Image (cartoon, grey):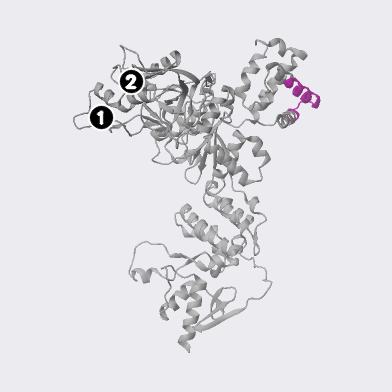
Amino acid sequence: MEHALNVKLRFQEHMLRTGKQEKTSTEYTRYIDNLSDHAKRDIFSIRRPAELAPLVARYDSNGPDSNQGNVYNGGLRAAIKQYYAFLQYHAPPLNQILYGPPGTGKTHTTIDETLAILDPVFLETYRMDRLKLRARFQELELSNHVRFVTFHQSFSYEDFVEGLGAVPDPVTKQLTFPPKPGIFKLICDDAQVKEVLVDAPPTIEIGPDTTVWKMSLGNRAEENHIYEECIKDGRILLGWGNGRDFSGITSEGGISTLLGGPTQNGKPPSGLRAVDYMVRQMKPGDLVVAADGNSKFRAIGQVTGDYAHLPRAADTFAQSRSVRWLKVFDLSMECRAIMNNDFTMGALYPIGSHALDRTKLAKLLSSSGTEVLAQQGPRERVLIIDEINRGNISRIFGELITLIEPSKRSGASEALSVTLPYSKERFSVPDNLYLIGTMNTSDRSLSGLDIALRRRFVFKEMPPRPDLLANVNIHGVVIGRLLTVMNERIEALLDREHCLGHAYFLPLIEDDSLLRLGRIFERQIIPLLKEYFFEDWNRIRWVLNDHRKLLVNCFVVPTESSTAVLFGESFEGRVQEKNWMINEDAFDRVESYLGIIDSDAVPPLPSTPRVSAGSVTYEGYHIERFKSRAVVVKKDGVEQIAKPILRSLAAKLSVSCLNSMGNEYNTQQLGDKVITAALKAKS
């Protein structure tokens, strides 16, 4: 929990900002400490308004402890109400969506938002240490306090809430289709406030040789009364065995005979192994874990008696043993509390040493109920839904879209619940589950988002942050200014929802080379602009300011082909006036990037002049290679776009444009090949 002193200081600052006097803020802090002593609970450790609300009502003028609230002329009551208002103002929203253009750090920010909910002290302490924040987030992922899912067009209610899963029956080998919880139901179950209903220490020492059994005490949906009977009467019941009495039978063969012997195809009778475990192999002192499906358990007990037959008229659960329940939970615990993996299908079997974590089991059994719950970490749970606007919201949430509203959650004044279609369980959304969605506005406009979703979430804009790049300067190109100018043009030509995010350029903080900048433009920025403008090359050129640059510095340049060459002089069809291509040389030229900001900008003079590493004049072109690896092609003293000319000269010189891997040489590599071949041809 957040350090009380830190919360007190923030509470006092909040009161001062809202108009309270300094004396009042100090007194109210002291009053809440007084109430903490009376309530025997540190009120400043409470961070959720819903958790504080019962105490506000308790000390209200009509509450059971109104006299205590009246102390200091009602000052204690006013103080706790003020703290309640403080929590409401600062509490993270239950449902929020981070939205913005691509590359603005939405998914990146979900880590900070998650830690603000689950571990705010850690976030404040290590806010500038990304590695530590990421490591803490991963710890919370491993403990299932936070889960992550990405919506897409094929995602459905069955994936998100509940569906049916195909599971082979271990005895009949036939497929069964039990209800299978989706990620939303799983985290809702995790978030439910748990209590330990039975909390007793073991009476027999549990050693490394103690056998631990997994047992299913009836199906929760249809036979939950079996489990309840077992807990109430201190026993376990097995439904296999057709209700027969196996008392006195000492061999597996005897049990098989009583069950009718092998089937016609020679297989053992159904339930033989489970009955043999129950009758012959289970011993007093063994532990039994009462499973709830394959991923949870709801009780742990210690076997105290031998096998007994319990005749029953209503069902076949006649195989019995007495048990002393050590831990019984009102809401099931995750397997991970004692296991390395989930349970497997089967009514009764011994848990293998590879699956059982005996250290965790011993710790759980030796801890008090309060300690067991504390070991589970913070009560809050977080579900991160990436690309929330890409899914079909009505299809995914179904009737649960109503239940995620803060006022409709369990414990709220207007709480609602529904019956799930497959498991037939009553279901509600707990008030300690936080939903964090991310939304790429270039995929879908905020105005076009499902209205049911829009009114149930708080929206937090994540705009581009050029300020994070203000100190990145590559040969005179200020990257923060470059991003700002490009986004201003995109907003004017399209809209602000299709701007470029700062995350594309963050690698330049570590590697501020022209080569890295070129790869970012070539592989990310230009392809994204092509998608934004549907390959409207004129508009792309306007964003890049190519219409005002020298041709050699343009990223997008016209090809030399014409309508007459392509279609003939008599062609009368309607086609675009020019064809365009990407000038690969521009990615390696400082002037190309300076020209985006200002077409008249001139790069600063290099500290050392460029040194030639070889040149040749061939077919009217002067080709020169420099030690910096740059290749320049000129005609009549005017610099040309190098790559197309080098390709043409390479064809004339019978030089391949492809390397041994089948990839095309870049301008520098192809220039080297052409210069070498041209010099050889002229000699």
- Say which residue label 2 marks: 239
| 409 sits to left or right of 11 | left
| 565 sits to left or right of 51 | left
Front residue of 673/469: it is 673
Examine the rendering and report whether any part of residue 435 can be seen.
no
Residue shown at 30% from the left, 26% from the top: 252
The answer to which quarter of the image holds residue 662 is: bottom left
The answer to which quarter of the image holds residue 275 is: top left
Relative vertical location of residue 446 with respect to residue 346 in this rendering, above or below? below
The magenta segment is 15-33
- Say which residue label 1 marks: 268
The chief SS type of the magenta part is helix
Mark 1: which secondary structure? loop
Residue shown at 48% from the left, 77% from the top: 673
Quarter placement of the N terminus: top right
Q: Position of residue 377 (x, y in %)?
A: 58, 31
Q: Position of residue 626 (x, y in %)?
A: 58, 76
Q: Disc 2 and disc 1: Cα gap in Å?
A: 17 Å
Q: Position of residue 387 (x, y in %)?
A: 48, 42
The amino acid at mark 1 is Pro
* Residue 532 is a magenta residue: no
Label 1 packing within 10 angstroms: few (<14), some (14-19), many (20+): some
The answer to which quarter of the image holds residue 397 is: top left
